[in-house]
Image (cartoon, grey):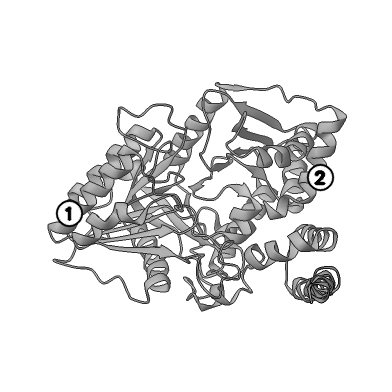
Amino acid sequence: MSEWLRASYSWITSELLTHLGFLLALVFLANLLRQRRSPSSTIAWLVTILLMPYVGVPLYVMFGGRKMNPMARRKQRIYHRSPGMVAPGSAGEGTERLLAASGVPPARPGNRFRLVVDGCDAYDQVVRLIDQARATIHITTYILGGDPGSQAVIEHLSRRAGEGVAVRLLIDDVGSWRLRRRSLAHLVEAGAQVAYFMPVLHVPFRGRANLRNHRKLIVVDGRIAMTGGMNLAWPYMGPPSATTLWRDIAAVVEGPAVADLEAVFASDWKFTTGAEPEPAGEPAAAAPESPPGGDAAVVQVVASGPDVAGDPLYESLLALIFSARQRIWIVTPYFVPDEMLARALSLAARRGVDVCVIVPVRSNHPSADLARASYLRDLHNAGGRVLLYTPVMLHAKVVVFDNQLAVLGSANMDMRSLFLNYEVALFVWSRPQVEEVSRWVAGLATQSQRELPAPGWPLEIAENVVRLLSPLL
């Protein structure tokens, strides 16, 4: 009997599993070829599934979904696609028309706009917004930490929930996987609502690990909002006692653009909980009168992800790169563009545009550093400037085009942010604010080294292999 069991086990492991793995690989390859992916993404998955089927197939099951994913299709679109009308002569008219084609709301004039460029200042702003709320506090974050600063924010939220403010906290399940849910028990007991975006430990799980909500939003009373790249955790932000905070950027907006940020939160909340985030208590007061003249900011809210038709953030960035005449300044922690975006930047540098990319000298993801190296070297050889920020980890996401537009938000300059994640960005079209962002970027440049180390041949081979697989990072 034992001989028969051993023979059966040997046949199952050597024959049946081999054939099953082959059949699964064929099924997923067929599914992959049916999807409208970028060539680089398709090739990367093909290579992984064909050469390493026992690794590639499980990875594709968990991470392969995008806009074709059933979970993504169930989420209501934030925008309704329409041709849209743009006022003649408006700033960025061509880009606004492109965004309007995906249903993105138009740029809103008359906003108060304040940059937040320090982690301690960001923490103070968050606490101030929470303490000033009268009716609602709506928060979306990719990472909520367990550090003392984060726990202090949770305590402030608990106190306001106990006072009758409607607190809704939306956390990404993957980004905040280290957070123990019992650490939020007091917040829930105080009356706050807490939801986890697309939990991974759920059946069916296909694609749930890949489609993440990377948006960072705080909207208070539908009146004032804070957004950018900072998570509610150390080392992104913290109280004055916090040390070794990363360099990051966010913005506080008050005015008409806040309604568009609130709509993004409402869409994410309804998808996660099935309920509309109805305001509680007395209605929020109307936004204050527009600030005078030159201080008024023109702000456009651009969401991207599987819940938006097309890829408006990626497409608008690509169009702006081709139309730029003086400068394209990019600040990003991870620079892993697709081939079209990389080629567009190199062409812009060759035609005399000041293309400058500032990245941390070393990021918190070594694989992303390997993947970026060949792209940065190509840009440098085309005449662009590549600067390596040295003081601390640089986590900011900013792009400046000429004197016309500054873009800041949650999206990195990589394929995951531009094609997979749920992201949100502010397009700031007003000259004073563009100049303010430009001065901040110029300050980073003074603290960056200009040498781009040349790799030896073993490192160059490793970089090229990682570049081949970069769409999977």
Indicate the quadrant where residue 242 lies.
top left
Q: Nearer the viewer, residue 399 or 119?
A: 119
Question: Of marks 1 and 2, which one's residue comes earlier in the chain?
Answer: 1
Which element type, helix, strand or loop, lies under badge 2?
helix
Q: Give whichever of 55, 269 is nearer the camera.
A: 55
Mark yes or no: residue 271 visible.
yes
- Quarter occupied by residue 139: bottom left
Q: Is residue 87 left or right of residue 337?
A: left
Which residue occupies 36% across, 44% down?
A: 146
Q: Which mark is residue 71?
A: none
Q: Quadrant of the N terminus?
A: bottom right
Residue at left offset 55%, top offset 66%? 208
Foreground of the two, 34 or 451: 34
Spot occupied by residue 308 in the image (x, y as percentages of width and height): 54, 69
All told, the count of numbered labels is 2
Residue 136: horizontal and vertical position, in percent?
Answer: 23, 61
- Residue type for callout 1: Arg
Q: Circle 1 — which element?
A: helix
Left or right: residue 405 compared with residue 43: left
Q: CA distance from mark 1 to mark 2?
A: 51 Å
Q: Amino acid at mark 2?
A: Val
Location of residue 108 in the rendering, given as x and y in whole percent from the top left corner:
40, 58
Looking at the image, can residue 33 be seen? no
What label sits on residue 160 in the rendered view?
A: 1
In terms of depth relative to the viewer, which is nearer, 56 or 141?
A: 56
Left or right side of 48 for 357: left
Disc ID at residue 465: 2
Residue at 66% of width from left, 42% of height from top? 368
